[in-house]
Image (cartoon, rainbow, N blue to C red):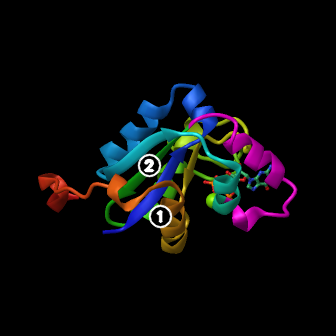
Amino acid sequence: MEKTFLMVKPDGVQRGLIGEIVKRFEQKGFQLIGSKLTMVSREQAAFHYAEHEGKDFYERLVNFITSGPVFAMVWQGDQVIPLSRTLIGKTNSLEAAPGTIRGDYAVHTNFNLIHGSDSPESAEREIGNFFKADELHDYTKVIQQWI
Ligand code: GTP
Ligand code: MG
């Protein structure tokens, strides 16, 4: 089944939004198969945001993501990668629609609460950057046939 890497960023943890964010993915019907509260090392951050290296916001982005604990998660489900991005909302806080996580809670593009993988290749890379295979738990949910 399709898997994605989602991460409540340091601002989301500080603002007490872990539960609210987890709730939205649970209620959508996705399955949580791994999670941890952890600090992101600078090496992990550089690997995670390699595509942005050299851009003007890169240093700020790495400083931010390493500034406090994050809540890292792996979720699975049909089309979980694109559907998670829809639930998360647009990157630019001025464009994030109400009803999305960023639209409802994020004020600044630099503090936009949550990360979600943007492709199957990114998901695989990002999951491997944060989780070992034995930290992920594939289990059967009987309700899955309905969603
Ligand atoms: P992530 O889930 O964090 O990867 O966000 P995203 O996939 O919606 O956006 P993207 O990967 O393009 O950028 C990563 C992060 O860099 C964003 O979440 C923003 O915080 C920041 N960022 C991206 N583009 C810009 C930009 O044009 N200006 C600024 N200031 N920050 C940006
Ligand atoms: Mg991204």
The relative height of residue 51 versus residue 115 in the rendered view (above or below) is below
Residue 74, relative to residue 38: is it above or below?
Answer: below
Instruction: Decide if residue 128 is on the left or right side of residue 105.
Output: left
Rendered residue at 53%/49% (across/down): 88
| The quadrant where residue 132 appears | bottom left
Specify the quadrant that holds the N terminus.
bottom left
Please give the residue where the numbered disc 1 appears in the rendered image.
82
Q: Residue at x 79, y 63 (%)?
A: 53
Displayed quadrant of residue 4: bottom left
Specify start and end residues of the magenta stretch as a single range: 49-69
Q: The residue under label 2 is which amino acid type?
A: Met
Q: Is residue 61 left or right of residue 116?
A: right
Question: Ligand 1 closer than 8 Å to the CB at disc 1?
Answer: no
Q: Is residue 95 magenta?
A: no
Q: From the top left corner, tell me how far across and down residue 97 is, in percent.
A: 58, 46
**Which residue is most to the right?**
56
Taking the image as four quarters, which one is ligand 1 found in? bottom right
Residue found at x 55% / y 68%? 122
Q: Which residue is mark 2?
A: 73
Task: Please tell me whether residue 59 belongs to the stretch shown in magenta.
Answer: yes
